[in-house]
Image (cartoon, rainbow, N blue to C red):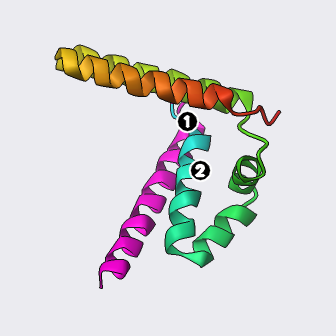
Amino acid sequence: MKDEVVRWLYLAAGWTALGLGVVGVALPLMPTTVFVLIAAFCFARSSERFHRWILSHRLFGPMVRNFREGRGLPRQARFRAVTLIWITMGVSMWVIHAWWAVALLSAIGISLTVYLYRLPCAD
């Protein structure tokens, strides 16, 4: 029972991430690649069918395969992801105004930025 609930949560998270990735195709500040990678991660843990589908998809498949094979992210995707991270972190810091929240969000933002820029470029 517990495993089935976890599987459904991964499946829901995968479709939510993929939906955000699709929205990111049209919105300049939404990082499509990052959300597609999250969706692939969730599908790998919830549905073999959807995992195969995203790997073979004409638009999403190359992103996931490049990342899995160690070729990293395209330069534009990395830039968009880091830009979105810092815009949302900045807005959150401005809204919350608590020192501990600013410190935590800064640490998360710095960690994500370092991680993304240490990945190899796929283009």
Count the labels in the image. Answer: 2
Which residue appears at 76% of the width and 45% of the height?
70
Find residue 37 and name its label.
2
Q: Is residue 23 above or below residue 12?
A: above
- Horizontally, residue 53 falls left or right of residue 31, namely right
- Horizontally, residue 5 falls left or right of residue 11, namely left
Front residue of 29/117: it is: 117
Q: Is residue 36 above or below residue 87?
A: below
Q: Is residue 120 above or below residue 38?
A: above
Query: Which stretch appears magenta?
Result: 1-29
- Horizontally, residue 81 falls left or right of residue 78, namely left
* Image spot of residue 111 (x, y percent): 48, 27
* Quarter of the image where the C terminus is located: top right
Provide the secondary structure element on which disc 2 rests: helix
Q: Amino acid at mark 1?
A: Pro
Query: What whole-number distance in Å separates the C-alpha atoms at marks 2 and 1?
Result: 10 Å
**Which residue in the structure is indicated by mark 1?**
31
Q: Residues within 10 Å of mark 1 (few under 14, many from 20)?
A: many
Which residue appears at 72% of the width and 53% of the height?
68
Which residue appears at 75% of the width and 54% of the height?
65
Q: Earlier in the sequence, mark 2 or mark 1?
A: 1
Q: Is residue 13 magenta?
A: yes
* Quarter of the image where the N terminus is located: bottom left
